[in-house]
Image (cartoon, grey):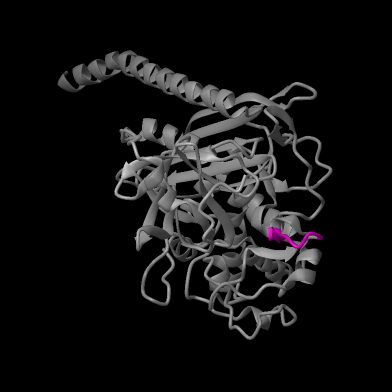
Amino acid sequence: MIRRSLLLAAVAGLPVQLAAQQVKHARLVARVDSIAHQALEEAKIPGLSIAVARGKETLLARGYGYARLGDSVQATPETVYPIASVTKQFTAAAIMRLAEQGRLKLKDEISRYLPDYPVQGRKVTIQQLLSHTSGIPDNAGADSSGTHRSALDFTPAEFLAVSGERPFDFAPGEKFAYSNSGYYVLGLLIEKIAGQSYGEFVEQVLLAPAGMTSSRYCHADDSGRARGYDVVDGVVAAARPFREGELFAAAGLCSTVLDLIKWQRALKDWKAVRGLSWKQMIEPVELKDGSRASYGFGIALGRLGKHRSIGHGGSVRGFSSQLSFYPDDNVTIVVLANSERALTRRIADRIAAIVLGVIEPKVKDLPLPAAAQERYAGVYDLAGDRLEIYLTGDKLMMRMGPADGIRLLYQGSNEFVTEPDPTTKIFFRMGQGRAKGLIFTAGELTLDAKSVSDEHHSPF
C-alpha cells in the first residue's frame, strides 16, 4: 500500500514538473531570441543560426534573419554556412585518425612526407603544426602591391608556390602563434598520406560516421548554402565570394548548427577519434620554456566563470562561427552567422552564461585623460597580424587590417576591454612610461604581442 501511494504521488507530480520545465525552456528561448535579435540589429548581420544542447538533449535550435537576402531565404537550424576556423578541429581529428591507423606519428618531421616543402633548415613536427607552435608564419605570400596575405587567400597549389617567401617567425616549439599556414600544411599532409583529397577524406572518415549529413567541404559553386555579407559605407552588401580551393584545411568546411552538435557529441563519446587521441587534442601545449598555451590540437581552451570550456571560433570573408563545449556541464553551444562582423563568440558566451547560471561581471569605463591614453598607442605584432592602437579624440581605439576601429574601455592598471565584447581584454606591458607590448585575450585564446613601431597616433 505504501509503495502504491508513493507511486501515485510521483505520477501526480509529473504535470507540475513538466510545467516547470516548459516555463524554464520558454525563458531560455526568450532570452536567446533577445540576444540574437540584438546582434542582428547592432552589427547589421543578415542572418544567424543557434543551437544549444545539454548531453543528448537539444535544448534549442533556431534561425534568425536571412540566409540569403536576394531571394529572402530565412535562416534556420538547417542552414549551411562556411564554418571558418572551426574547420581546424576536423583537420586535427583527421590527423589523429591517421595516427591511430599507424600511418604517421605526431613527432614525425613534415619533411618525411612533404620533402619539397621549404622548412628553411628547421625541424618541424606534425605536432607543432597542430598546436600552432611551428613558427611557420600565418602570412604566406604577397600580392602585386607587396602586401602579405593570409594563407586563406590562396588555393593549396598557390600556397605551395609562395611558401618559403617569409622567414619563420620563431624556432619550432619556442612560442605559440596562430597560423593558418600550418593547417594548410596539415591538409597537404592528409592528402599525401591518405591518397585522396582533403575534403573526401574528412567526409568519409569523420562527417559520415558522425551522422553529419548536411556537412561537406565547401565549393565555390554551392548555391544552396548561406550567402556571405559585409557592410560597406554603412550598407549591407554581398561579400566577395571565395574561389574554389581557398580556405582549404584551415577554414574550408561547411556545416549547420545541428550537425556541429552531432560533431561535439562524437568527439566527447570517442566516436570521432579514440579516447587517448581526444585527451591529446584537449591538452594545453607545452612550450620550450615550460609554459603552456591555452590551445591543444585544433581546440582552444578556456573558462567562463568557473566553468571549463573547449572549442573554436573563426571568421572568414562574409561569415563567422563559434563552437563552445563545457565538458564538466556537458553543454554545447553553436553559433553560425553570414557576416564577418558577427561576434559569434560573444553571442555564444552570453548564451552559456544563461544556461550555466554565470553572472557576468560589470564592465567599467573609467576616465583616463587623452595624454595618459597616448602612451598605449602604437603598432603591435599580434601573431603576424598588425594590431593598431590609436586615439580618436579622447577615445582609445583598436583595429586590425581593414576592419572598423573598436573602442577600448579602461578597467584600471593598464587593462582595457573592447566595447562590443568585454571578454576581449588587452593588458599593456609598460616600460619607461610607454607600452612595450601587450597581452591580448579573446575568450579561450591568449596571445602576446610586442610593439613594432613608434607610430603613436592614428594613421587615418
Where in the figure is residue 58, as x and y percent of width and height?
49, 32
- In the displayed orientation, state which residue is furthest to the right: 221
Q: Is residue 117 left or right of residue 272?
A: right
- Residue 450 placed where, x, y %? 47, 63
Quadrant (top left, top right, bottom left, bottom right) of the C terminus: top right
Left or right of residue 41: residue 236: right
Instruction: Determine the residue located farthest toward the front in the rendered image.
Output: 371
Residue visible at 49% across and 36% down?
Answer: 393
Horizontal relation, residue 67 to residue 390: left or right = right
In the rendered image, the quadrant that contains the N terminus is top left
Task: Determine the image quadrant of residue 66.
Answer: top right
| Residue 164 seen from this side | yes
Q: How many marks?
A: 0
Can residue 209 be seen at all in this image of the molecule?
no
Q: Is residue 293 above or below residue 169?
A: above
Q: Is residue 59 above or below residue 416?
A: above
Of residues 139 and 189, the one drawn nearer to the viewer in this rendering: 139
Q: Residue at x 80, y 64 (%)?
A: 158
Residue 70 locus on image (x, y percent): 79, 24
* Residue at the bottom extreme of this rendering: 121
Looking at the image, the residue that sits furthest to the left is 2
Q: Which residues are magenta?
A: 144-151
Of 395 and 422, nearer the camera is: 395
